[in-house]
Amino acid sequence: MPRTFDTPLPIDAVLDELARTLAGGNAAVLVAPPGAGKTTRVPLALLDAPWLKNRKIIVLEPRRIAARASAERMAHTLGERVGETVGYRVRFGSKVSRATRIELVTEGIFSRQILDDPELTGVAAVLFDEFHERSLDADLGLALARDAQVGLREDLRILVMSATLDGARVAKLLGDAPVIASEGRAFPVETRYLGRRADAPLERQMADAVAMALRADPGSVLVFLPGAAEIRRTQNFLGERVHDASIEIVPLFGALDAAVQDRAIAPARQGQRKVVLATSIAETSLTIEGVRIVVDSGVARVPRYEPDIGLTRLETVRASRAAVDQRRGRAGRTEPGVCYRLWDEPQTASLVAYTQPEILSADLSSLVLDLAQWGVSDPSALAFLDSPPAPALKEARSLLAELGALDGDGRITAEGKSLRALALPPRLARMIVDSHRLGAGEDAAEIAAVLTERGLGGDSVDLDARLDQFRRDRSQRASSARSLAHRWASQVAASEDSKAAVPSSLSSLAGESLPPTGSGGRGGGSPSTASIGATPTPEPSERCREHRDSVQPWQLLGCRWGCALAVVDQLG
Ligand SMILES: Nc1ncnc2c1ncn2[C@@H]1O[C@H](COP(=O)(O)OP(=O)(O)OP(=O)(O)O)[C@@H](O)[C@H]1O
Ligand SMILES: [Mg+2]
């Protein structure tokens, strides 16, 4: 029997069935509406399972904020602090101890964990939460976990959870695992459609809607906007409309410090109301106490890889039906609520049902390298819900071969292993290694940090400016990123030092005229390192030839690795 809890939640009705299913089998799919209790109750309910045997339950969350907040909530439910029975591990920090039995981790952290230890020593169960988001790492994590379960760890429990998921498809992937569905809703949410005018900016209409919602109903408000820029503009418009000292307006997006994010999702102070202006990072997993109004722009920003130019950009699109339902669900978590939608009701039917899985449109070079590390050169050998597209695979393989990470048979090379060990997109890992050989490893590592942390160093398209700002930034996130960059550079230095003389592809490219180190000489009228913008990057070698007499090695990175420098569109 699973343990009982003081506060009843809708999911409680299926906990017995879930316990029985996982006692008798090793996989299950759990589908339950937003707010039912999947994230914060199910892991706790499994704590007394006989198969746990003092081992851990790993819970995958799509975002760091979700990992921290869910750990916080579960620890609170147990009357403990985070890091005791319940802990978390994310890129910039972890709170776990020997006593930890439930670990909330981001999906990327889990992929690395299982690649490094395919047997998942000490882990009894892996729970894939919010699986409908279908990030590349979640798909990879599930494929690897299933492979490990079939080949090495029959006793490993796999549970896939989601509010809006085609459960049958996932169940089939897991060897016809049982699907447990819970119908119980949290609280009712009334949906009101406001429509959207073509003649006024989105932010102005959103600010109008929020001001109206504040007048019409009590409670705090959660507002969904596509990105940080729209959040800032809406905040300005709202400042002109709302002059009430009891209303606090706070932004919430990925580029903010963890502590600032955690304050944004804390309940409003006594007698106060809160308006949280958020991107889709608040779409799943989070409960903000007191929020009973959601205002949804219906727009989302998603990454799209463009193979022709090797860039991933952020694209603004209509949110999927699954996403807008998740957003609405935030209004009914602690009491009945209301959701305003900035579109007309009939348009809801024309939204795509689900957000496109990342695997269908992403740069697959990391995935292919990870699979090679796993010993698989053909992804069809693994259980992917959607197969990685052949053209993207082909391109990833040829890039990895060019980077020296795969051999002619598609097997991972020793070089590939050290690149993978950096936990970076392979191009960026290669950039650090080659730069180290030119004496600019630390610079390159800082560039990699800026490029993999959205908004770090600001949002300038000039990388010089971004790096300068990053180096001056005293925030917690920036200093964690600097430590991480330093670790990458040291890791590369250690591994390179352990090798004998190494011929570098980059040194031959750079020619003899390059100075040996990357210090000094930055800017000074020489070409900007890279423009993270819209124009396709010229053939790297061509640009490098153009600049080879004037650039410093680290600037050369902008030529040789022009694509890498724009690996992630950091704007917005
Ligand atoms: N921090 C919190 N403060 C107050 N109540 C909370 C908090 N976290 C969770 N709850 C309560 O627990 C319920 C279940 O939350 P949980 O996040 O586990 O649901 P879920 O099924 O995972 O939802 P979703 O699909 O939206 O992620 C919420 O509806 C809310 O009533
Ligand atoms: Mg959840």
Image (tube, helix red, strand yellow):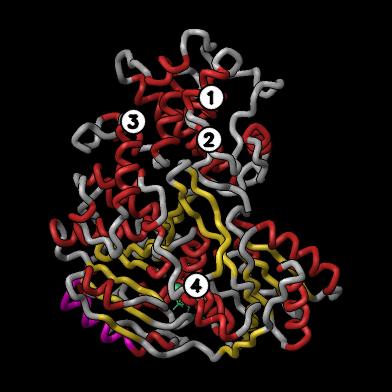
Question: Sequence order check: which comes first, mark 3 or mark 4?
Answer: 4
| Among numbered discs 3 and 2, the one appearing first in the sequence | 3
Within 8 Å of ligand 1, the CB of disc 4?
A: no
Which part of the image, by quadrant, shows the N terminus? bottom left
The residues tagged by marks 3 and 4 sit, at their Cα atoms, a distance apart of 37 Å
Residue 17 lies within the magenta run: yes
Q: Residue at x 35, y 56 (%)?
A: 98
Of the numbered discs in the image, which one, if any, rests on residue 537?
Answer: 2
Residue found at x 72% / y 75% = 197
**Alpha carbons under labels 3 and 1: distance apart:** 18 Å
Image coordinates of residue 566 in percent, x first then y, are 53, 40
Marks 3 and 2, how far apart in space?
18 Å
**Cβ–Cβ below 8 Å for labels 4 and 2?**
no
> Is 232 positioned to the left or the right of 349 in the image?
right
For disc 1, the marked residue is 543
First in residue order: circle 2 vs circle 1 = 2
Does the magenta stretch mainly form a helix, a strand or a loop?
Answer: helix
Please state if 119 lies on the left or on the right of 283 as rendered.
Answer: left
**97 shown above or below 500:** below
Residue carrying label 4: 320
Q: Secondary structure at mark 2?
A: loop
User: Nearer the N terminus, badge 3 or badge 1?
Assistant: 3
- Secondary structure category for the residue under label 3: helix
**In the displayed structure, would residue 255 be above or below residue 293?**
above
Residue 447: x, y in percent?
54, 34
* Labelled pair 3, 1 in contact (Cβ < 8 Å): no
Label drawn at residue 402: 3
